[in-house]
Amino acid sequence: MRRILCCLLVLTMAICALPVLSCAEGSSSNIEYFNDGSYTITEIHKESLRSSKSVTGNKVNTHYDSDGTAKWKAVLTGSFTYTGSSANCTSSSASVTIYDSAWYTVSKSASKSGNTASAQITMGRKVSGITVAKVSSDMTLSCDANGNLS
């Protein structure tokens, strides 16, 4: 019995030490539609560390064709510190995951300024070796003085 209680205590302590994962408060998904019927869904995901005035978040743009099949995903990751009176972006990075080989990354860059992380990503789609479409994702992720992401 003592061994079980000890294991439960260790498990509880380990869970409490893990980062808290949640969607950013007050955020919602946004959908942008294109003329060809395709669309991009934008979401914000937040990871904050307990007892620390820092937060890391992702803004995720997933592009779908008109049939609802995911073609690619662009992710802006930003890390921030906040004090209750101000916030600062400490790092910014961008990544792309391609689900359909007809799509490719034309350009990708990330930057940070003040309390904002930014990424500019352009994707292209080729048919028979010819680029027939380009989609740009200009993403920003900001942190306020209380650690809320938008």
Image (spheres, grey):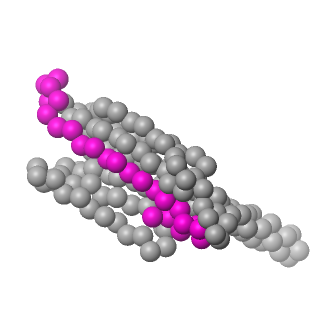
Magenta-drawn segment: 127-150
Q: Nearer the viewer, residue 35 or 73?
A: 35
Residue at the far left in the pictured view: 36
Q: Quadrant of residue 132?
A: top left
Q: Nearer the viewer, residue 46 or 145?
A: 145
Residue 118 drawn at (x, y percent): 44, 48
Seen at 49% across and 42% down, the residue is 111
Q: Is residue 109 above or below residue 23?
A: above
Q: Nearer the viewer, residue 39 or 15?
A: 39
Q: Is residue 28 above or below residue 37?
A: below
- Magenta run includes residue 144: yes
| 71 with respect to 126 (left or right) | right
Residue 72 drawn at (x, y percent): 31, 44
Q: Is residue 48 visible?
A: no
Residue 18 drawn at (x, y percent): 68, 62
Q: Quadrant of residue 20?
A: bottom right
